[in-house]
Amino acid sequence: MKLSLGDSPVIGYQHHAYRLSIMAQHTDFFNWFYCNYIQLVLVKRPYTPVLDFYEFQKSSPLLGEMYIPKSLITKYTPLIPFLKDRLEEGKYIITFANEYYVPNRLNYQRRHNAHDIFLYGFDPQRDEFHIAGFNENFLYNSGEVSSALMEKALLQFDQSKGDLIEWADGMHFLDLKHSNTFTFDKRIMLEQMEEYLYSRNSSDRFRMYANSAENVFGLAVYDEVIDYLHNLRSHVTDVRIFHILYEHKKVMHARLRFLVENKGVQLSLEHIDRYEQLAKQCLVLRNLCLRLHISKQLEVVERMIKLLDIIKETEKELLQEIIGDLAAQ
């Protein structure tokens, strides 16, 4: 059996794709999605920064979620039969696995590394779990893992390393809440657009839950990425930075089309087309990053920096005009 999945608009990091591919099946998905996935956040690191969409919390009103530690489950029952039962109940599973035991992963039989994994089905004839995630070729797709390997992957972390090892005991069980609804909120969308435009710290909204994060937000992330490229000493770069920029522009363009086609909003076709061009420029930027990896020619970096400057200034001007038009309606 396989639980159904929709198409995730974002796959730059697989944790987005896991939840979004479930939620994409909900009738109110785009009402929720286009009120989110607007702000960008950059976390400074010693060598390579981390760029991602800003999220306050992983869940949404369209998803039900229950967290249970593996150590609690295995105290009372074997893990694999328990997971099969949850899948039969319609629960999707997000957890953490030692990729040394997961076929078609970059670290398979090479390196013990803790990473998140998504289970959405089980084949009793073949005794295999259906999983999704990035394979050894860095492509997001589906695959299968035998029950025997899955048990090792989920429980054997003695030699594992990686940033996610501290969460390796966690298991999240999710289901789609068809009866829940979400109404599109133009005001909150505009507020987040302004936070992105003016590089405001969106974590300030949630100070009653946690202290503000000392990260970089909005258009200011461009300057940090440019600074990162200026200080680059080798051809090794994190392509995810540039893929997230590309997906951000794709989502912004799709959001504008959604407003016009589904919410009766009046927007200039020129503005919509210009955001589509920004997405294409960010795709060129991402491909330049890939070229840098292959050619090892550091002069490619200068082209990337110049293109980033152009994209930043174009988006700043364009978004100011779009926000003005939206606020007037």
Image (cartoon, grey):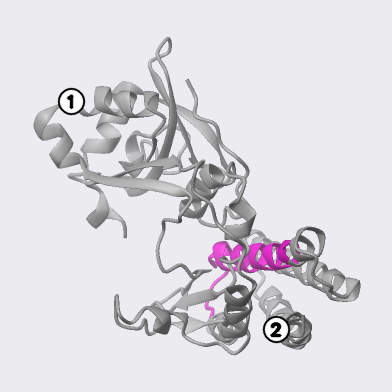
Name the front one of labels 2 and 1.
1
Q: Nearer the viewer, residue 153 or 63?
A: 63
Q: Nearer the viewer, residue 291 or 31?
A: 31
Q: In the rendered structure, does residue 74 fall within the stretch colored magenta?
A: no
- Taking the spot 23% from the left edge, 44% from the top edge, the residue there is 68
Residue 45 image position (x, y, % from top left): 39, 77
- Taking the spot 40% from the left edge, 84% from the top edge, the residue there is 204
Residue 296 image position (x, y, % from top left): 63, 66
Residue range (magenta): 232-255
In terms of image quadrants, where is residue 222? bottom right
| Label number found at residue 78 | 1
In terms of image quadrants, where is residue 44? bottom left
Compared with residue 10, is residue 200 higher up or lower down, i.e. above or below? below
Is 52 situated left or right of 56 in this image?
Answer: right
| Label number found at residue 312 | 2
Asked which secondary structure carries label 1, the reply is: loop
Is 157 situated left or right of 19 in this image?
Answer: left
Compared with residue 300, is residue 123 higher up or lower down, i.e. above or below? above
